Amino acid sequence: GLAATPLLGTAPQQGTLTAALVQGNVPRAGLDFNAQRRAVLDNHRARTDQLADDVDAGRLPRPDVVLWPENAADIDPVRNADARAVVDAATDRIGAPILLGAILTPPRAPDGTRRGPLNAVIRWEPGVGPTGEYVKRHLQPFGEYIPLRDLARRFSPEVERVSNPLLPGDAVGVLDAAGTRLGIATCYEVAFDHIVGDAVDAGATVLVVPTNNATFGYTDMTYQQLAMSRVRAVEHSRAVLVVATSGVSAVIAPDGAVLARTGLFTADALVADVPLRTRTTLATRLGAAPEWLLVVIGVAAVALVPLTGRRGGDNPSRPGPVPVARDETPGGTD
């Protein structure tokens, strides 16, 4: 009976959310994916317009919130009028807030310094515009910034391609949309326990992973990230919505099951009702404590090896050699 009892709940505890995941695709794969930044933005607007057509025709339900991936708008839509017009048109057409990944370039401070650029997720409301943002906290080394640049350039001149490194944010990744608290882990951040755990602790009832895997082409990286997202779903008993620029986008149930997914380098959209869950798991409550405990145990075990590895002859507790029985019958042969 106990073996048949489900260990992970998937039922809604605070209603459901109808979410649309828009994968607009990119002009090309590889490191130069963003050479045509406006094309990437236009792709996501065009696929959102197609989604709106399907909604108006009754082929798909109207979403409560629309998700665009990381780097969907690498032209700052807050300060660039043309990019802003594109996002405004998309939100007005679909009639729902869009959470979109964008690179922001904040204005210079009075002292001449600039905080940015920033890898952000922006909440964009129909008829209003940007109303909130989350800035990626855990940046990817050698991709979004170069650690120890002077040393690294001795090994490869390619580090100079990251000429304008991003700056990290400092706020937990949560944004409210359509009455739902969404927890956000942007791309690389899904690999870090505290990024996702902090969002759940802050009240997130569903998790969102906006990502851009175009730089990795057709490698297995996107599938590795999908596997990490499935682990996060099980770990925190939350639905996870992975929305990728070029794939793979996916809807993941709180038990880790993949309910829907897209292909690589195709324009597509997924619409799904996902459960909103409020109950925290043991893994959420314990956080990284079990990992640190195992580390301490491992270090202690290694430290004890010299104390327990003495030779057998020096160890009085170790038994000596066992004598072998020999035939010593008096008189020799029969």
Image (cartoon, rainbow, N blue to C red):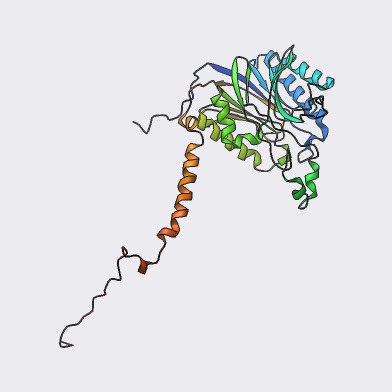
Which quadrant of the view contains residue 222? top right
Q: Residue at x 36, y 69 (%)?
A: 313
Q: Is residue 289 above or below residue 237?
A: below
Quadrant location, the C terminus: bottom left
Residue 239 visible from this viewpoint: no
| Image coords of residue 173 (percent x, y) | 63, 26
Q: Residue at x 55, y 17 (%)?
A: 16
Judge by depth and name the residue closer to the eye, 247 or 37: 37
Quadrant location, the N terminus: top left
Q: Residue at x 54, y 20 (%)?
A: 276
Which quadrant of the view contains residue 19? top right
Q: Is residue 230 left or right of residue 282?
A: right
| Image coords of residue 202 (percent x, y) | 56, 23
Judge by depth and name the residue closer to the eye, 112 or 179: 112
Q: Is residue 52 above or below residue 9?
A: above
Q: Is residue 124 left or right of residue 161?
A: left
| Image coords of residue 254 (percent x, y) | 52, 28
